Amino acid sequence: MHSLSLRVFTDFTGSSAARSSPCRGGYGGLTLGEFNGKACRILACAPERNGNGGGRSRSSSSNTSTTPSSFLSRSQTYALLKQQMEVAAKSEDYEEAARIRDSLKLFEEEEPVLRLRRLIKEAVAEERFEDAAKYRDELQEIAPHSLLKCASDATTLGIRVQVRSVYIESRSQPSKGHYFFAYRIRITNNSERSVQLLRRHWIITDANGKTENVWGIGVIGEQPVILPRASFEYSSACPLSTPNGRMEGDFEMKQIDRVGSQSFNVAIAPFLLSILGDDSDAF
């Protein structure tokens, strides 16, 4: 099986040591993002073959790095490549943009998480469920978050909460460890009573397992009242220091047409934040 070899080059010559950067991880002993204050260029080299002497194997097993930490490093590299392609395109350096585009295509073809997702989808479509289970277990081992979708859908006491997340390249700085994700939420009241959203609670977990709890009044400065058979939608965002993570939580709500009614919590099912995205349908 092939593995993608990525190298970091700079636009100057010299033998000084690499300077530390907020971006964790790297390739070839160099930290991605900066080298002695100079911007780095990341180029994809020819794929390396393993010792089996031949073409791509259908098996997902590999001698290349397939640990959670290596997945984090590959994701950081992927984000940097995408950002550099955007910069090259805006500066009208189309030759460089095309070169980076080809690097991205090769990366996407060889990235273990994306490949395992494809294998799972193919196995399910062909009803090879044992293979699908095997690929799922491998995916769970190297990138636990990736089994989630970038969307979720849950109903509590007739209140349905749908979420869809997306990575925003233009507001992210991968070389500094800043990744920006936007998400859109639709709350639909399928109950027989009007409800008001009082408070929100989010549990945000990054790719390193660091968890943060966030509480607040209402959403986007509002405490909306949602009538029966009506919906309320809003958009918000979540910055992360890693290219992948997850969010989940709950809304505290109250039925407003019942005197003395107690508030209740409405679940927000877990969903993925990922620069790789997925094929989830937008609601």
Image (spheres, rainbow, N blue to C red):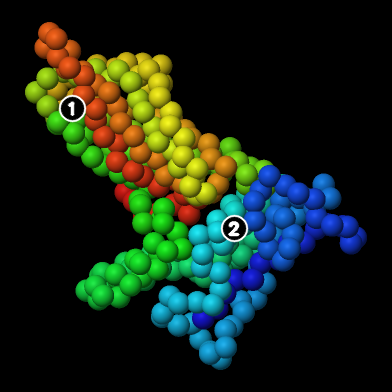
Pick whichever, 172 or 261, lies toward us: 261
Q: Residue at 64% across / 60% down in the picture?
A: 100
Residue type at numbered disc 2: Ser
Left or right of 103 in this view: 52 = left
Residue 12 lies in quadrant? bottom right
Looking at the rendered structure, the secondary structure element under dot 1 is strand
The answer to which of marks 1 and 2 sits earlier in the sequence is 2
- The reply, left or right, for residue 59 in relation to residue 176 is left
Q: Is residue 118 visible?
A: no
**Residue projecting furthest to the top:** 259
Question: Residue extending furthest bottom?
Answer: 53
Q: Nearer the viewer, residue 273 or 282?
A: 273
Q: How many residues crowd around disc 1 within 10 Å: few (fewer than 14), some, or many (20 or more)?
A: many
The answer to whether 85 is drawn above or below residue 249 in the figure is below
In terms of secondary structure, where does tag 2 sit? Answer: helix
How far from the left and from the top, in percent, is residue 260?
Answer: 14, 10
Q: Which mark is residue 73?
A: 2
Instruction: Check whether the beta carbons of the residues at disc 1 and disc 2 lie within 8 A of each other.
Output: no
- How many badges with numbers are in the image? 2
Instruction: Please tell me whether residue 155 is drawn above or below residue 245 in the rendered image.
Output: above
Taking the image as shown, residue 14 lies to the left or right of residue 88, namely right
Q: Position of residue 155 (x, y in %)?
A: 19, 37
Mark 2, residues whose alpha carbon is within 10 Å: few (<14), some, or many (≥20)? many
Q: Residue at x 21, y 19 (%)?
A: 263
In the picture of the structure, the residue carrying the numbered disc 1 is: 189
> Residue 29, relative to residue 272: is it above or below?
below
